[in-house]
Image (cartoon, helix red, strand yellow):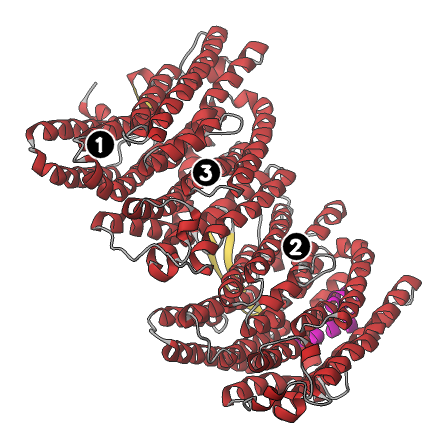
Amino acid sequence: MDILSLFVVAPIITVAALLFTKNLQQSRVVALIGSLVQFGMSINLIFAYLAERATGNTSIMVFTKSVVWFKSLNIRYDIGADGITVFMIILASLVVLAGVFISWKIKDLPKEFFISLIVLATGVYGFFISLDLFLMFLFFEVAVIPMYLLIGIWGSGPKEKSAMKLTIMLMGASALLLVGLLGLYFYSSPDGNYTFNILEIAKVNIPAQVQHYLFPVVFIGFAVIGALFPFHTWSPSGHASAPTAVSMLHAGVLMKLGGYGVFRVAMYLLPIGAKEWSWFFIILSVIGVVYGALSAIKQTDLKYINAYSSVSHLGLVLFALLMLNKTAWNGAILQSLSHGFMTALFFALIGMIYERAHTRDVRELGGLLKVIPFISVIYVIAGLASLGLPGFSGFVAEMTIFVGAFQNVDIFHRVATILGVTVIVITAVYILRVVGMMLMGPLKKEEYRDFPKATWYEKTGIFLMLIPIIIIGTTPLWISDIIMESIKPFIERML
Amino acid sequence: MNLEMFLKMQNELLLVGLLLAVLIGEIITSQKSKVKLINVTIIGFALVTLIGFIYQPTQGSIFGGMFRTNALIQLLKNGLNVGVLIILMQSAGWLKESLVPQKKSAEFFMLMFSSVIGLNFMISSGDFLMFYVALELSTLPVAALASYNAYKRQSAEAGIKLILSATLASGLALFGISFLYGATGALYFDDMANLLQMSNLTILGLVFFFAGLSFKVSLVPFHFWTADVYEGSPINVTSYLSVISKGAAVFIMMFILFNVFKAFTSIWQPMLYGVAIATMFVGNLFALRQQNLKRFLAFSSVAQAGFMLLGILNGGVLGATSVVYFVLVYMFSNLGAFGVVQAISHKTGKENMKDYEGLYRTNPLLSLIMMLGLFSLAGIPPVAGFFGKFFLFTAAAGKGYYILVFIAVVNATISLYYYLKVIRAMFLRVSDNPIPYFKNDIFMKLGLASAAAGILVLGLYSPLFEYVQSISNLIFN
């Protein structure tokens, strides 16, 4: 078994083991062991990756493996990893692990909950390691479908509606994506030896005319799950209704599939289309960035605030990718990672507050710093990271993005960048507003005094998210070096 | 004519033998042992199915080309046999408890087997006359089966509706065939393929023939009988109509369009294009509001037929492969869903979506099988339907029908909405009055398990697709 296939096999084994568990105690232990193993594997993966690169292996993808699956259509189980993949996998495994801790006391149907969670994780890992578009598409849908059950069964509020909306919108996007992928397939070879393999399609020059039509299709197909304006509407309601761990996974990992797919497939395989269309999608992403942030100011539900902030932050990822230079791309990857940890942390904290106060309305909360100091302090830290305080990951990522964006000297990109930069201020507004209303001031209600302290499993979940934020924030160079290394093929192809 | 030539009709002969055995068994057994007769018949049919897999008849044609067989036809026959076997296993309980007291259990088998024989002859036919006779043989017994719930008004209505529309359909097909015969003087598929020339008369012949066959596949606008007949018929007859009969009809439609009307490709491709869009939209949009699960699955199966047309539009090996593969996949998926509906309807008489609320908490296994079937119909990975649909779309995109593929995937998304509605009822909702836990008999368990196994295995196991590809490559290239 190669090192990457394990990321598909280990979750499947975990699911199989979960099938035999009988109660909450058993299933959470099994899920914990499974996700710990996955986390261990991802840590092992980064060291293996560095060792592999140190031996002088400069191929685009390492740890590749290719098994023929459907021979007549040339569909293969093609997997491989570069630096970006490795970091995405670490992000995913950490969030899953934290998600298991946060769901330690899940009440209803625990076995089914953890199974859906791990199936979702399988889809995510599979998506990241796929080099074959068919395989990638398959894992994409595997990752989306459990969301329906996760939100629908264990969610709160208008859960059925939100779950349906999310699933239908994401599946509709994947419908668009499917058309694009089939287009890529049939233009992957002039003589009938079609292939779904990304690296092989990259060797073919797809005619500019075709790229002109294919690029928006593939781009939107992926970008919907990356919350591209105006296709972001599934995200706030989905987040708001989802249970805590699912919000974490959803915002922290699942939405990253969008940016990753846009970068790896749409832009890498259709470079001419990307250049042609970038202005249009830059406009959309800037609208998303500013609109998401402004909406977050106005919201009162904590989860909605965070969901809109996600729309804004992930808009920045697409924005940076479309800036078409290596600094901005580097920033986009860093932002993906940083946002993944930050949002997951936020949602975890919101879940803990909600469990104690049974409300997520900031107007009804106040003075929480006095009763749950640990959670509140972490909330402040997460907020500061989110608004880009130096020393945390948000600063590094956003700084890189805007430095990259500013390298485009023409007036359009300048204006777009300046509009984008305003988000830093707006973010500060909505973060500090929440901190002020919810954590400071006098205690709103007397019964808040009896709030229990953070438990060990909550603390573990929090630290699992907080540590990476600080690592990215304080020692970003080694990470961006690895990312830069992996961006090289993109630079060669596009710039 | 020696024995070996005769054995090309192995499947049909075995079925006729089984039918006669049931007839004799019905006469010589007492009323008390009728239940045993049902078991024996099902086991007998299982043996027939097994023999079909073990002894492959040699390729070729007999009766001067009226009857022909090849590996692809044999594969489809075997597949249909498996489907019928699953249906029989799923209906064993209903047969024993409802039909034995009415003394109608053996007739059920005889009618069902006659229809299967008709279908087998139909997909093996090499001549329009043979095709027509087989079409009638496959349809008429089903009309009797549709009205089998003698004490239900709807069932009688279903029988009448089916026979009326089937007669009209076969009349239309015959009308079209007569045009073609008039233009060419030939009835054999091969002769006609060589002799057919583009003229208004032959085009009209093609259109009428296609319309007649469209009834059987329930393509829009020839689908009006579907919902009422599916709802009124006993569930096993519904699943037979929607799976076996439809699958065979799609196959022969594809075969005739590819071979006989090869020169007319420029005519039938736009025709199919329009029909496919109409079929998918009508099927899906009507399914959205259905509450009765049989009606719901009826419209879903109308929409699925629209997807199959995408493969036929390809007009080549990839199209043939994807259609045959999809028919097999669709068979298992639909039988999984219908099997659960059958089990619940038989035990509790409930068929509405609302009754399924909270089913997962009382009957988790049934709910999971239903979920598998519905996910497969919706085309969600990693179950078989995903692969089936993906290959159909690939086949259509291969000929440059990107817009049609887009319309189809939009429809797949619409269909996901209503499939999720059933899943919502079973998994998300909690009911005060859920369907209580019940145990199924051994045959039902086997039937459901084999459908579920098919749904799980068929997609991920690529050699099946490769096999279909290799044999259709031999035939259509």
Q: Are marks 2 and 3 in contact (CB under 8 Å)?
A: no
Corner quadrant of residue B87:
top left
- Range of magenta residues: A315-337
Q: Which residue is mark 2?
A: A221
Judge by depth and name the residue closer to the eye, B325 or A73. B325
Q: Residues within 10 Å of mark 2 (few under 14, many from 20)?
A: many
Relative horizontal placement of residue A168, taking residue B74 as reference (left or right) = right
Measured Cα–Cα span from mark 2 to mark 3: 27 Å
Which amino acid, by three-letter code, is at mark 2? Gly
Image vertical order of residue B198 relative to residue B16, above or below: above
Residue A377: image quadrant is bottom right
Question: How far apart are labels 2 and 1 at the CA level?
Answer: 50 Å
**Residue under pointer 1:** B109
Quadrant location, the N terminus of chain B: top left
On the rendered structure, is A312 left or right of B364? right
Residue at x-position 69% and y-position 57%: A266
Task: Compare residues A174 and B180 and report the one nearer the observer.
Answer: A174
Q: Which residue is mark 3?
A: B301
Q: Secondary structure at mark 2?
A: helix
The front one of A5 and B80 is B80
The answer to whether any part of residue A50 appears in the image is no
Q: Check residue A327 for magenta coloring.
A: yes
